[in-house]
Amino acid sequence: MAKVFPGIEPQIAKFIAKQHIFFAASAAPEGYVNLSPRSTDCLRVLDEHHVVYLDKTGSGNETAGHLARDGRMTLMFCAFEGPPMILRLYGHGRLVPRADSEYAALLAAHFDGIEPPGARHIIHLTCTRVQTSCGYGVPQFGFEAERATLDEWAAKKGEAGLEAYRAEKNMMSIDGLPINA
């Protein structure tokens, strides 16, 4: 059933590349566990132990608060099409702010220098455990398309509107943790 790998091996990277969605889970030592769905169009495997994804502005910013406090993070991928499988990447995440030179370097090297509307930071996960499990209980679904709603919302707000929104909605987690992003 479950199998542990020393890192993100080529067949694991290939599996990730075929997925359309992943789930990012994080938690502080106390309070709520956060679990958020994300589109894989903003995710990149850097090497066998490192993954990054561009995190877009949303209704909350729990992951940033949790990473600043504890760093524990898990990314989960489920095969909704094709052979069943679940993949979990366990490790420690950290935030790479937009103002940081590392952000610009990652954007240039792994995202063709293109920043999607609403990008607020990059999440960098250092994987300490790579594990698959059967996925037999995961239902099959067919992919239709990416939703354009978040990008359209962010483009309509513009950079100044996004900054104001983040200042109002994204500076405190639901657990009361300050977010310095």
Image (cartoon, rainbow, N blue to C red):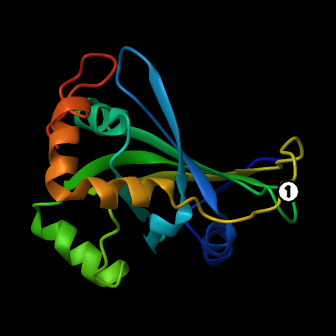
Residue in view at x 87 percent, y 53 percent: 140
Seen in the picture, residue 86 relative to 8 is either above or below; the reply is above
**Within 10 angstroms of label 1, few (less than 14), some, or many (20 or more) residues?**
some
**Camera-side residue: 61 or 147?**
147
From the image, tell me which residue sits under label 1.
84
Seen in the picture, residue 4 relative to 31 is either above or below; the reply is below
Furthest residue to the front?
A: 156
Q: Is residue 69 visible?
A: yes
Residue 132 image position (x, y, % from top left):
71, 53
Residue in view at x 85 percent, y 56 percent: 84
Q: Is residue 123 visible?
A: no
**Camera-side residue: 16 or 104?**
104
Residue 155 image position (x, y, % from top left):
32, 61
Residue in view at x 17 percent, y 44 percent: 181
Mark 1 belongs to which amino acid? Pro
Residue 109 image position (x, y, % from top left):
30, 83
41 sits left or right of 84 in the view: left
**Camera-side residue: 67 or 116?**
116
What SS does tag 1 mark?
A: loop
Residue 46 image position (x, y, % from top left):
41, 73
